[in-house]
Amino acid sequence: MLALGRADGRGNPVLRVGDELRRRVPGLLDEHGLPSVAVGVCDSTAVLWSAGFGTTRAGGGEPVTAETAYGMQSCSKMYTATAVLLAVQQGLVELDVPITRYLPEFRVNSSFEDHPERRITLRHLLGHTAGFTHEAPVGSNYLVGRESFQAHCDSISDTWLRFPVGHHHQYSNLGIDLAGYILQCCSGQPFHEFVRRVLLAPLGMKRTTFNPREIMRDPHRAIGHAAGTARVPVRVPMVAAGGLYTSVNDACRYLQFHLTGGASLLDPALLAEMYAAPQPDQGYGLGLALTHAADVPVRGHGGGGFGFLSDMYWAPDEEIGVVVLTNSTNHPLHWELAEEIFRDLIPTRPHRTAPSPKPVTAPTTFQAGTAAAAEGAWNRDYVIRASGVRDGIARLRKENGVLLFDHWAGGTVRLREHLPGLYVSATGEMLDLTRTPPTYANVRLHQH
């Protein structure tokens, strides 16, 4: 275990890293056209070093500090999963009973089995093994809208599972959102209030919230920036999966919760459930990634979208946590800085010269696949109008008797007809021509 020490002077490795960051980061902001970055390092007992660089918005705003709030995007999933485990500890819910116990009216479509909802559990939702696609018809990364968290979760019943319940891991916003919605229904409180009461308040995280009203009126939050988008959404319906805002100091306090084995707030046996991958070599537990940074085993999550990129990970064997928050999506700096800090603070471990691959937590493009031939199709071009990205062209075409769908990111999937007007790809995503407008993976397609 690394002895970090807290004595003043150059002998403290954390202070050395901090000095180096203060020297380098301003130039990196200019190099990447990045408005700001906030960085924090902690161990199990304290926030050892934290600082903000740049300003809350490009070309102006306030100077960023360690208390400036950033959009955490998919890092939110860790907090939601922790709140679910606290609800398990309270006896409010159970991990391994069908979610229809808590949502008796919930249904979801499947081409593999009847009534799959009767087999889906909270463990499936938190581990991304329920079979859900990534987006819902109401409220998504492609079309945010102004609908409520409840309306977003209600629309999940209109989706199709990509694979049989429990078959394998496939990252999805919908399972985490549904888990948060279950907490809301079972507690009788808004989801954001339940999380505040059971997790945020006990840990003293006053700069952390899922509450969109608090976020919108916070004068000291960073503003997200994305290429080609003048103004990115702040309020999103995907609350439990990506709606959290926090500061780098509060993010370090959350990592300390894990570094202290639950901080006497959560039973260590339940934390062990969180850290265990539902399937071997999955690389994901319950709401958090199990990966490496600079060859060091770490746990945590990354987040990206709506103008923010962030990483927050801790090394359990070394008892050190690192947080990097940014308010732009046009750079690789968040992961590169996090890896560098782990490498600099744990120098005794042999490291590869090449960086570790960035953990994949939020696929944003459709995947290619193969499937049987389908009949009765015709050539059509579509435009996908997505929030925060440029318009893309998708094309439905028939070639040598095979129905193909070319999506706007450059991939191709083959389709087979499941029901009239409803086509399924080998990846399990559905092309639905019965809807107006048609959809692929619940993303709306507009005739080009």
Image: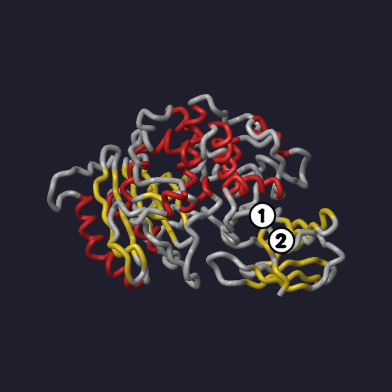
Q: CA distance from mark 1 to mark 2?
A: 9 Å
Q: Are marks 1 and 2 in contact (CB under 8 Å)?
A: yes
Q: Is residue 339 visible?
A: no
Is residue 312 in view from this perspective?
yes
In x, y percent, where is residue 76? 47, 47
Give the SS element for disc 2. Answer: strand
In the rendered view, would you say 57 is above or below 205?
Answer: below
Circle number at residue 104: none
Residue 293 percent across, percent down from the top left: 39, 52
In x, y percent, where is residue 147? 59, 53
Give percent across and percent down for residue 138.
64, 54
The residue where tag 2 is placed is 439
Q: Quadrant of the C terminus?
A: bottom right
Does residue 140 lie above or below 401 as drawn? above
Q: Which residue is drawn at the image coordinates 24% and 46% (left, top)?
A: 48
Q: Which one is earlier in the sequence, the residue at label 1 or at label 2?
A: 1
Q: Is residue 441 left or right of residue 351?
A: right
Question: In the rendered view, does 281 fall on the left or right side of 99?
Answer: left
Dot 1: element: loop
Count of numbered labels shown in the rendering:
2
Residue at the spot x=28%, y=70% of the render? 27
Residue reaching furthest to the right: 376
Q: How many C-alpha atoms fall within 10 Å of the one at disc 1: few (<14), some, or many (≥20)?
A: many
Tell me if mark 2 has few (under 14), some (14-19) or many (20+) residues whose alpha carbon lies within 10 angstroms of its own: some
The answer to whether 199 is drawn above or below residue 381 in the figure is: above
Q: Label 2 sits on what residue type? A: Thr
Q: Quadrant of the N terminus?
A: top left
Q: Is residue 267 left or right of residue 283?
A: left
- Say the numbered circle drawn on residue 137: 1
Describe residue 418's horizontal placement relative to residue 322 as left or right: right
Identify the residue at horizontal 75%, vertical 38% (top origin): 115
Q: Amino acid at mark 1?
A: Pro
